[in-house]
Image: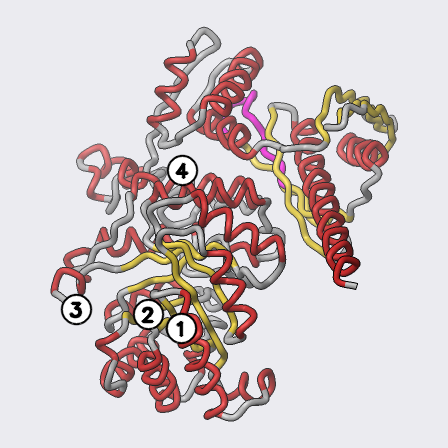
Amino acid sequence: MNEQANKRVTIFDTTLRDGEQAPGCSMTLREKLRVAAALRDLRVDVIEAGFAAASPGDFESVKAIAESVEGPRICSLARCHPGDIERAARALEPAANRRIHVFVATSEIHRKYKLELAKDEIIRSAVDAVRLARESCDDVEFSPEDASRTEPAYLAEVVAAVIEAGAGTVNIPDTVGYTVPTEFAELFRYLREHVPNIDQAILSVHCHNDLGMAVANSLAAVGAGARQVECTINGIGERAGNCSLEEVVMALRTRAEHFGLETGIDSTKLYPTSRLVASITGMHIPRNKAVVGENAFAHEAGIHQHGMLKHASTYEIMRPEDVGLSRSNLVLGKHSGRHAFRERVEQLGFSLEDAELNRAFDAFKQLADRKKELFDSDLEAIIMNAETGSTGPWTIDELHISAGTGTIAAAAVQLSHADGRTIKEAAVGDGPVEAAFTALERATGIDLDLRNFEVRSVSIGEDAQGEVTVTVEYNGQSYRGNGVSTDIVEAAARAYLEVINRVARRTRHDSAEADSVAAKQAATI
């Protein structure tokens, strides 16, 4: 590896695979394509588009991303099973640059209780899988699942074997977020010293955040020789999440004198990409989230404000502009034109197609008639809704609410369906929100189990937009929905209808898949 290459850290984004596995974070194909395009613009090196063998839907998602996204290497995960590898290879065929990522567990606890396989059987399985993957793809990555709890000597044996079989990248996962930085760095140093052919592959790191150390552990691995980091936007992922892409990238950039390393990421796209993923998944970004949280560049303490007025570097180690956060106070008003609106959207780091821009501009005009003052955060909420807005089948035409102290709340809704139907329903409830939810359920015929209801202010002022996030369960699966409006009840209704639409689309998709499978079986018979 030449000196310049040794200073470059590959950013492997797994938002669409590991990130989407988090409860409630499932995305539609349209949403996955939107995120993949944002990751391309962010200039990530590798996009893990999904687990092609997991389901027909996953296969189609990986294939669609492979067909439409140029630039990054497109990757699919696969177990060390011939069927998985064949499905991954087929899904990735349209991609100009592709990678198959195979994995098998190696720790004693996994060998004993999950796989029930001996050490030599696991090595054989790993080697056979890498060789098979190489037959259809020149770029193969291997991961020994639960590597951080695997005996170092055995792990070194596995790594040497898969490199010999043709793996160009070997990823060392902290699958359950168990390790700590000093221990993890020592494991990477051990592998570099005890794997004779280690120079023939790139060492990668994949950390989970169960103990809150995913970023710290990833950086420790980089310091010990890893040259690929696997991470997700906003750190989303199973359980407590994954290593946060924006945090690890900005740590390498901000502390370049310490690490002496660089990435190819366009950091000015971090904030808009973060907001896009948050909007699609319904996973709010905590205000105090590093790099992209609302408070990341806010200073309230007097001594901090005084220092900032003297020189920004007194209390800011990064500039807001570095991560794509461009703030101003009053930005636009109801007399602002389309050109000014487009210009401000672009200044905020967002790129909208003409149809999306038209929807956003119309929503902006409607909001400007209702609000005295509009802020960047208002525009961001509008943009997110324009980009990820409901694709139906249901839309709200009218919503009427009646509520007051000592009275029973009532709601009446009129919905339109994509097939041309118009439905009217009414309901009562303990409050206006419950009444609206019940009316929506009656109109659509979909009953949901509400698990969580969150409200937050999008901007400031008495007429600020409110954002409602609902988490529900339907048939044992968790769904999230978002809604934004200056009227909280309307925002709640929009969030609830978004979930209903997700359920309706999923039900329709599952039904179509079942019909397709039945037709194929009948044809076979």
Alpha-carbon span between mark 3 and mark 4: 34 Å
| Residue 63 lies within the magenta run | no
Residue at the spot 25% in from the left edge and 56% down from the top edge: 252
**Amino acid type, residue under disc 4 in the picture:** Pro
Residue 142, numbered circle: 1
In the picture, the quarter occupied by the C terminus is bottom right
Q: Is residue 517 above or below residue 183?
A: above
Label 4: element kind: helix
How packed is label 1: few (under 14 Cα within 10 Å), some, or many (20 or more)? many
**Amino acid type, residue under disc 2 in the picture:** Thr
Q: Are marks 1 and 2 in contact (CB under 8 Å)?
A: yes
Please give the range of residues in magenta: 459-469
Q: Nearer the viewer, residue 135 or 221?
A: 135
Q: Which callout, 4 or 1, points at the residue further toward the start of the chain? A: 1
Place of residue 416 in the rendered image (x, y in percent of width and height, measured from the top left): 76, 24
Corner quadrant of residue 428: top right
Q: Which residue is mark 4?
A: 272
